[in-house]
Structure formats: structure tokens, C-alpha cells
Amino acid sequence: MLGKIIVGIIIGFASGWYLVKSDAENGLSGVALIVIAVISIAFIGSSFGYGVAYGLMAIVEIATGFFIASRVFKKD
């Protein structure tokens, strides 16, 4: 259980880091954006396999990691 929580936060943190660090002028690489989406959706889907509460926790974990990354790597 603790492992899934840590993985969820890492997925959110990595997603947030990539999205915050990418240049707005150049845009995101389509392949990288698809990989981030597929990994996030797969993690959420596998968590919903254990039950609704675990699926909702997965969404909160990814959002928390994303929020932390957006605060740490904030553009000025």
C-alpha cells in the first residue's frame, strides 16, 4: 500500500516537472505527453481495480505530486 502511494506521488511529480520545465514556445512533444497520459491512466485504472477508494486515492496522489512539482519548479 505504501509503495503504491509513493509511486503515485512520483508519477505526479515527474509529470509536473516535465510540464513545468518544458518551454511554452516550443510546445510539448506529442509522444512525451502521450506517455505521461498513458502511465497516469494505467496507474489510476489499476488502482480502481482494487476498489473505488483506491482509485480516488490514486487521483489524489498524482494531483499531490503534480502540485508539489509545480511549486518547486515554478516559473517566475
Image: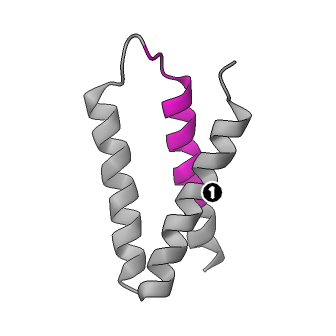
Furthest residue to the front? Answer: 76
- In reply to whether residue 14 is colored magenta, the answer given is yes
Q: Position of residue 51 (x, y in %)?
A: 42, 89
The N terminus lies in quadrant:
bottom right
**Which residue is the site of mark 1?**
64
Q: Is residue 23 above or below residue 45?
A: above
Q: Is residue 50 above or below residue 57?
A: below
**Relative to residue 61, is residue 38 drawn left or right?**
left
**Span colored in magenta:** 8-24
The C terminus lies in quadrant:
top right
**Relative to residue 66, is residue 22 drawn left or right?**
left
Residue placed at 33% from the left, 36% from the top?
33
Using a 10 Å C-alpha cutoff, classify the residue at mark 1 as few (fewer than 14 neighbours), some (14 to 19) or many (20 or more). some
Q: Position of residue 70 (x, y in %)?
A: 63, 38
Towards the viewer: 42 or 75: 75
| Disc 1 element | helix
